[in-house]
Image: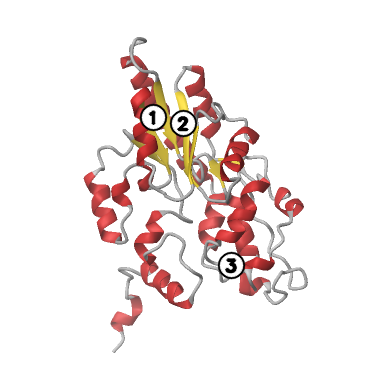
Amino acid sequence: MTSGTLKINRRAFMTSMVAGGLTAGVNARSPENSISGQLNEIELSRNPLLWTVAWSNTAAEFGALCHQAFNLARLRVDEAMEKHSRSERPLAVVTDVDNTIVHAGSYWSFLISEGIDFFDDEIWDRWIPENLIALVPGAMDFLKYCEYHGVEIFYVTNRDQGPRTYSYALNQLQYLNLPYSDSEHLVVFRESSDKTSARERIGESHELILLLGDNLNDFKRDYYVADVEERRALMERDRAEIGDKFIILPNATDGHWVRAIFGESEPAATDENRLKLLAAATRGAWIGARSTQG
């Protein structure tokens, strides 16, 4: 199967939306309906993405972590407003979009339903303009709270779907009816994941009180390193700022933590990379009963 033969079924995606604001998984297709025509449910059930996507699509704990993050973000906004003088620069929050405000569950569920176990950029590019999205739990309440109190929201994302990238991103924000969903408050990087320049530019005109993201690289570029232990050490260095200047949302499917394992953020679906994933998942594994055998 090649992703180039994919035709996205909008109706199948739309039926996966559930009332709670999350996206339910697309049902695994039967062999006769599968694009490959060869994958049965047992084979689909071996996909290593299953636990991660099932958790983000169904777990109340996922929603609770998101609400916890936005509740903490609201406290930080309240603190900033108490200290703020009307004569000073306006207050602002910078937020990432994907997996911070926008929940991409239908994309990951589709990959699983097709037997794909690694991020597929071509499918992602086809998925984006379909607006088959939902809001991350708690996102709208927080954004509306900021709007009500005059705290501006700037959306900063890195995407590349060609010349229409920016219009696709803006259309998603407006489709979700988000506050400040206009060209003055959206920054899109097509050729880089480094958002530093956007944060600095916004900081020239506004008092930047909070950063929201699902990736520590949304906080500081320092985290764009291809080493697991180095990223963890940087996180420990910055631990006092986490929950203060930076609020992080849960995302176990993708991000620069992937780059630290594979050396790239979107690794190819190869057996070599599957072995790297296995090695990462079994770091420090308990030897168990084998240790007692002669």
Residue that numbered label 2 is attached to: 154
Residue that numbered label 3 is attached to: 116
Label 1: state its secondary structure. Answer: helix
- The amino acid type, in three-letter code, at marker 3 is Ile
Does residue 166 sit above or below 185 in this rendering? Answer: below
Task: Report the disc number at residue 142.
Answer: none
Real-space Cα separation, disc 3 to disc 1, in angstroms:
39 Å
Between 56 and 126, the one nearer to me in the picture: 126
Image point (33%, 53%), residue name: 224
Q: Position of residue 2 (x, y in %)?
A: 63, 71
Q: Position of residue 58 (x, y in %)?
A: 58, 50
Observer-side mark, 3 or 1, equals 1
Image point (46%, 24%), residue name: 152
Real-space Cα separation, disc 1 to disc 2, in angstroms:
8 Å
What scheme was used to colour the molecule? secondary structure
Between 250 and 201, the one nearer to me in the picture: 201
Image point (47%, 23%), residue name: 146
**Discs 2, 3 touching: Cβ within 8 Å:** no
Q: Position of residue 209 (x, y in %)?
A: 35, 27
**Discs 1, 2 touching: Cβ within 8 Å:** yes
- The amino acid type, in three-letter code, at marker 2 is Phe
Location of the N terminus (image quadrant): bottom right
Between 104 and 65, the one nearer to me in the picture: 104
Task: Report the disc number at residue 202.
Answer: 1
Query: Mark 1 vs mark 2: which is more N-terminal?
Result: 2
Label 2: state its secondary structure. Answer: strand
